[in-house]
Image (cartoon, helix red, strand yellow):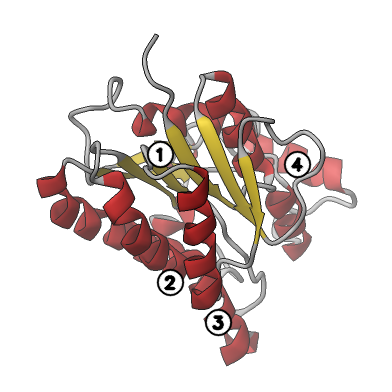
Amino acid sequence: MSESKTVLVTGAGGGIGRACIHHFSEKGWRVVGVDRFDFGDDFPKNGRFIKADISHPDSVEQIFQEARDFHPTLDALINNAAVQVAKPLVDTTVEEWDSVMASNLRSVFLFAKLAYPLLKIKGGAVVNISSVHAVQTSANIAAYAASKGGMLALTRAMAIEFAADNIRVNAVLPGAVDTPMLRAGLGRGHLGGSDMQERLDNLARKTVNGRVGTPAEIAYAIYFLADNEQSSFMTGQALVVDGGATARLSTE
């Protein structure tokens, strides 16, 4: 039997993060999950949950101390944690802008920097969870879109710098996925609808597949990019998983 691998997932308690934790665990990986909120009682018994706010640099140092205590190497880092401010750019405060950048972009830099020595021991993978908002966006979500666009550029830069140590770096760009963040964002009212289900239905009709994605579907794509056997010749790439939403002309 091959040696068990280890993955660290930020934003572990959210929709996509939680799906990753369970999927990697089911595949036999040791899982380290990080979130500022409690995960609950269903965190895998062979893993380690660390409650921390990844937007604070001091917290990141402590997270990696605990991660190294759990296991001295990493096979994959999943930068998934994110926050979203859904409001017009002109109404966004400096504090809100900085909060989004700290959680969504600076944390990716810090986690990659501290994970690097653990990943290069065996040659691992980094998967950054960006968004279709990095390439096509909408009104009243500027800070989030900017942070995800920055993450995409950072992914390419990291891939170039880490390649010499056999560390691959790729990004997943999810489209509309039924998560708590999506449901909160639908409060912007840009899709119409008097209740949440009607808004979700309106959103589903805008995708080629005619539905909203599930967190598990994104977790499968993330696992593909994290697994050195399945995606060994991929680095610096952006994998769009959006039900075909970005394939359709907005004028159609």
* In front: label 1 or label 3: 3
Label 3 or label 4, whichever comes before in sequence order: 3
Q: Amino acid at mark 2?
A: Arg
- Distance from disc 4 to disc 2, alpha carbons, whole Å, reads 31 Å
Circle 4 residue: 200
* In front: label 2 or label 3: 2
Circle 1 residue: 240
Badge 2: few (under 14), some or many (20 or more) residues near its Cα, within 10 Å? many
Residue 13, how many percent across, how many down? 69, 47
Determine contact: label 3, label 4, CB under 8 Å.
no
Most extreme residue toward the top is 1
Q: Residue at x 52, y 76 (%)?
A: 58
Label 2 or label 3, whichever comes before in sequence order: 3
Q: Secondary structure at mark 2?
A: helix
Label 4 or label 2, whichever comes before in sequence order: 2
Residue 4, how many percent across, how many down? 43, 24
- Distance from disc 2 to disc 3, alpha carbons, whole Å, reads 12 Å
Q: Secondary structure at mark 3?
A: helix
Q: Amino acid at mark 3?
A: Trp
Circle 3 residue: 97
Circle 2 residue: 106
Q: Secondary structure at mark 1?
A: strand
Side (left or right) of 191 relative to 237: right
Q: Residue at x 74, y 49 (%)?
A: 180
Q: Quadrant of residue 115?
A: bottom left
* Vertical arrangement, residue 143 with respect to residue 67, above or below: below
* In front: label 1 or label 2: 2
Side (left or right) of 37 relative to 168: right
Q: Nearer the viewer, residue 88 or 234?
A: 234
Which image quarter holds the N terminus? top left
Label 1 or label 3, whichever comes before in sequence order: 3
Q: Residue at x 60, y 53 (%)?
A: 34
